[in-house]
Amino acid sequence: MLEDPLISGHATLTSPRALIPVAGIELSNTHFEILGKGGTQLFITGQTDSGDGKINLKGILELDAEQNWPMQMTLTGKDFLAYNLPEAQVRVTPEVKLHHGQNGLLIDGKITIPDAAITPRSIPEGSYSISPDVVIISAENPTPERDDTTAVQARIKVILGDDVHVKAFGLNAFLVGQMTIHQKPHQLARANGDLKIISGTYRALGQNLTIENGRLSYAGGHLDNPGLNLRATRAIKDEIVGINLSGTLRAPDFTLFSSIPGMSKADISSMLLTGQTVENLDQARFYAERSITPKLSVGVNAGGGDEGSEFVARYKLRRNVHVEATSSAQKSGGRLLYTIEIE
């Protein structure tokens, strides 16, 4: 009977190569086996490779519709290339258990990330943050009745290795540490834990400031908005100026400081921006730019002393190739620029 099946037999799935465009990865040496021994259980094993790593799957599926098809699975692996797109390249070493039943799917375990490069180009269109003061009290369409049998719960401990690089929202740094991600049914994922910045820069006031120490902290908040505790500095001869950063990654707060006692905020800001105090700005040079179109930008290169200021127009021919034209009271000219990015 279909309501009480007894399965005997053996099935295999083998694929030498399979593409997953949404993750930018190519699976190879994929092999899965399903074995029925004349009862209501199916024994499942399998493995697949991605990059230089692999993952293995092993578990049991119970053919019981009334119990919502109970399942116990274990996922293990090492250095599996899980994501390989321009905005992120991530390798993982998972040790995860999956439980499925009347209460939906529960994912429990840990994932080590030995190396990753996370460089989002921009915030996705349509993304926005709702103020914590906003409370939604009604909706035009009622929320549909929830089905707990399809709910997903997760408790995953994520451990960062020593080669995890994040470049986003002005932060360009290498991170270590660990956090635990909690996913409750029908809710956004949240996290607890601390990630330490071991080296990097933070861009503020037009400058890439050196991070002396820093930490990203999760205390039950959303994954994309950790708390900040960061100190970043700029060295100018024998003097140090910088910022202490707090708040969150999307809404940072900062205070200014200097190695010179009593220096004003205006002088600290000026030194961060130009390398000179306010009274010495006639010796400073700085550049301000504005994008007119995705390919065209214009700016002013302001110089002190006899150098004067010049108008700059820059046009992007390709990703790393620009044409630049300059004009000032003393001279005009142009040049072709080719940029090499080194991380």
Image: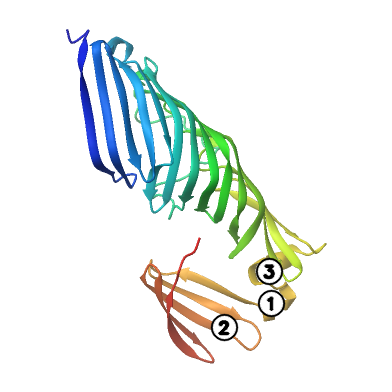
Q: Amino acid at mark 3?
A: Ser
Residue labelled with disc 3: 270
Residue labelled with disc 1: 281
Residue labelled with disc 2: 309
Q: Residue at x 35, y 43 (%)?
A: 50
Which of the 4 image quadrants contains residue 93?
top left
Which of the 4 image quadrants contains residue 140?
top left
Category of crowding for the residue at label 3, using alpha-carbon neighbours closer than 10 angstroms: few (below 14), some (14–19), many (at least 20): many
Q: Is residue 290 left or right of residue 305?
A: left
Q: Amino acid at mark 2?
A: Ser
Q: Give the alpha-carbon distance from disc 3 to disc 2, as whole Å.
A: 18 Å
- Chain-order first, disc 3 or disc 2: 3
What secondary structure is found at the residue carrying circle 2? strand
Residue 280 position, x and y percent, is 72, 77
- Chain-order first, disc 2 or disc 1: 1
Q: Amino acid at mark 1?
A: Leu
What secondary structure is found at the residue carrying circle 1? helix
Relative to 201, say whether 275 is above or below.
below
Relative to 86, say whether 302 is above or below.
below
Which of the 4 image quadrants contains residue 217?
top right
Q: Give the alpha-carbon distance from disc 3 to disc 1, as whole Å.
A: 8 Å
Category of crowding for the residue at label 2, using alpha-carbon neighbours closer than 10 angstroms: few (below 14), some (14–19), many (at least 20): some
